[in-house]
Amino acid sequence: MRKLFKIVLALFAVITVSTACNDNSENPIVYTTIGTLVQGSASVGTPYYAVFDDGVKGFVDNTSLWTPPFKEYEVNELRFMISYTILDKPAPAGFDRTINISQARMITSDKLSRVSETDFQGEKGLNTYRGDVKVDEGYYSPAMGYITLLIVYPINNETFQHTMRLVYNAGNEGYKAMYKDDGYLWLELYHHDGGDSESFLRGAYASYKIDERSLGVTMTDYKGLKIISKGIDSNEPHIFTLDFAQ
């Protein structure tokens, strides 16, 4: 069964990497952005490296101080909010810059899944995902094939497991009747509140990996995304529009 990830905290635990400054600056500029940390190898010449969402590839100079939990999650890439400095030293072949990571906050990630009518049935089907939810902001990165969303949802008690699913609906259930032939790829976002009650709103970043082959789509065929969700305290579903950069 496909592993589902829960969104409970706005950003997962912060990993602070203590390191001496070796970027030839007393007050180096610290950049913070979302990116992918990718497991390296002996042939690559590093245990892991960074690929930012604009496609820039960063060689991490201080890998000895911290290693992302690739083995724990049984994957070779993980999404993080990364704080880093750019070092004044040449980047090895195949990389665009050399960096030191000072903080890394893990972001929930999952695959964008293709669903049909049967996925809306049963005790664990999408028909049971009835929690309020909407997308507040988002962007698409062709570099590593991720959709990153800021998802807003109500929460009361952090001990409850809130589960989000972003899906490509190949069937006729869900919100399919709302789709339009307008050049956008239509997706649907569902929220299972785990039995929690509503008290306040929380925002959480989540990234979804796109596998064009398994979905049966080609992203370059579309001018953007439209993501339908239940909305927050609304009688009408919420539609978030994301236009791709031209």
Image: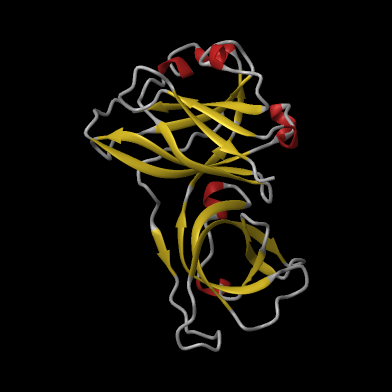
**Where is 157 relative to 67, above or below?**
above
Q: Which colour assignment does the render follow?
A: secondary structure
Q: Position of residue 78 (x, y in %)?
A: 56, 52
Q: Where is residue 198 in the image (x, y as percent from the top left)?
A: 24, 30
The residue at 66%/72% (across/down) is: 97
- Figure quadrant of the C terminus: top right
Q: Where is residue 108 in the image (x, y as percent from the top left)?
A: 48, 45
- Figure quadrant of the N terminus: top right
The residue at 40%/52% (across/down) is: 12
**Where is 205 relative to 119, above or below?**
below
The residue at 57%/71% (across/down) is: 63
Q: How many marks?
A: 0
Q: Where is residue 218 in the image (x, y as percent from the top left)?
A: 74, 33
Classify residue 114 by image quadrant. top right
**Where is 120 relative to 30, above or below?**
above
State left or right for residue 130 relative to residue 155. right
The residue at 72%/69% (across/down) is: 95
Depth check, front residue: 111 or 27: 27
